[in-house]
Image (cartoon, helix red, strand yellow):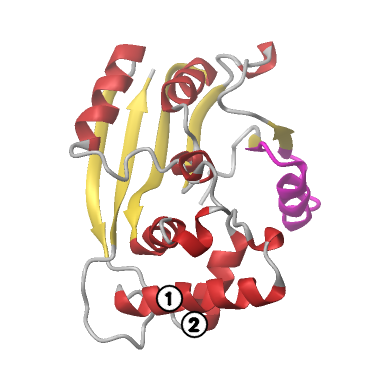
Amino acid sequence: MLPKDFTRFVCTDISKTMLQHAERQFCGISKVQFDILDITGELEGKMKSSFDHIFSMYCFMWIDNQRKAFQNMYDMLKPEGGCFLVLLARHYATDTIFQLAERPKWKKFFPDINKAYPFPYRLDADPVKTITDMMKFIGYVNTKVYWEKTKFVFNSVEEYLGFMTAIPNPLSLMTPEERDDYLKESVELAYDLKIIQDSEGDEETGSLLVVYGEK
């Protein structure tokens, strides 16, 4: 996927653990490096105007401060550099969490659900306009933002539960009995929303945002 003559490929994450995991996957490739980065924090000098291309796959929906993240990404690009992002606008899988959090039994485990699950475009009536306007205000040119339906479903209950336990969750705060009940109710909602493959139907289960812009 990368051109053979690339100079440097920098992988960034706010989590040291995730970077260590990624580093094991790219072990021995000298031109790949790994840096801790809070995309909503203050950039180090070495990060500014340093990149020809920036890619982000399914990350930006976890960022609450979109304005700062897009500004930092712009500042990281070299002149005429470009960014390409794919993020979830909304998906029924995360909708199950918001629904469960409204139930009295589970509400205490979600004191600030919008902080734990930002998904800033989940309820936005026109996320394409929101992102386009923000990017143009920052200074991006040749912006292209697309909204696309997705029919993504999970292949099995096990795969669904693997996803639900891998993303931020309150399970560690629950007793074993509460944990079992919570996951059982989550699976029931997943079937109701038809996001497990053996559910009937071939319906839309969410939406994606595909974003491109240049400096």
Q: Nearer the viewer, residue 23 or 68?
A: 68
Q: Position of residue 209 (x, y in %)?
A: 31, 45
Q: Amino acid at mark 2?
A: Val
| Above-or-below relation of 158 to 204 | below
State the residue position of label 1.
Answer: 154
Q: Amino acid at mark 1?
A: Phe
**Residue drawn 29% across and 29% down?**
131
**Residue drawn 46% across and 60% down?**
104
- The reply to whether discs 2 and 1 touch (Cβ–Cβ < 8 Å) is yes
Query: Could you tell me how far apart the alpha carbons at marks 2 and 1 are, in whole angstroms?
Result: 7 Å
| Above-or-below relation of 197 to 106 | below
Label 2 crowd bin: few (<14), some (14–19), many (20+), radius 10 Å: some
Q: Position of residue 87 (x, y in %)?
A: 39, 46
| Label annotation for residue 182 | none
| Above-or-below relation of 162 to 155 | above
**Residue 26 is one of the magenta-drawn residues:** yes
Residue 141 makes an appearance in the image: no
Q: Quadrant of the C terminus?
A: top left
Q: Nearer the viewer, residue 161 or 100?
A: 100
| Label annotation for residue 157 | 2
Label 1 crowd bin: few (<14), some (14–19), many (20+), radius 10 Å: some
Kindly indicate the quadrant of the structure image that contains residue 161. Answer: bottom right
Q: Position of residue 97 (x, y in %)?
A: 45, 59
Q: Which residues are magenta?
A: 12-33
**Residue drawn 51% across and 52% down?**
1
**Residue drawn 42% across and 58% down?**
94
* Residue 40 shown left or right of residue 134 in the figure: right
Q: How many marks?
A: 2
Q: Position of residue 190 (x, y in %)?
A: 38, 74
Under tag 2, what secondary structure? helix
* Residue 7 shown left or right of residue 76 in the figure: right
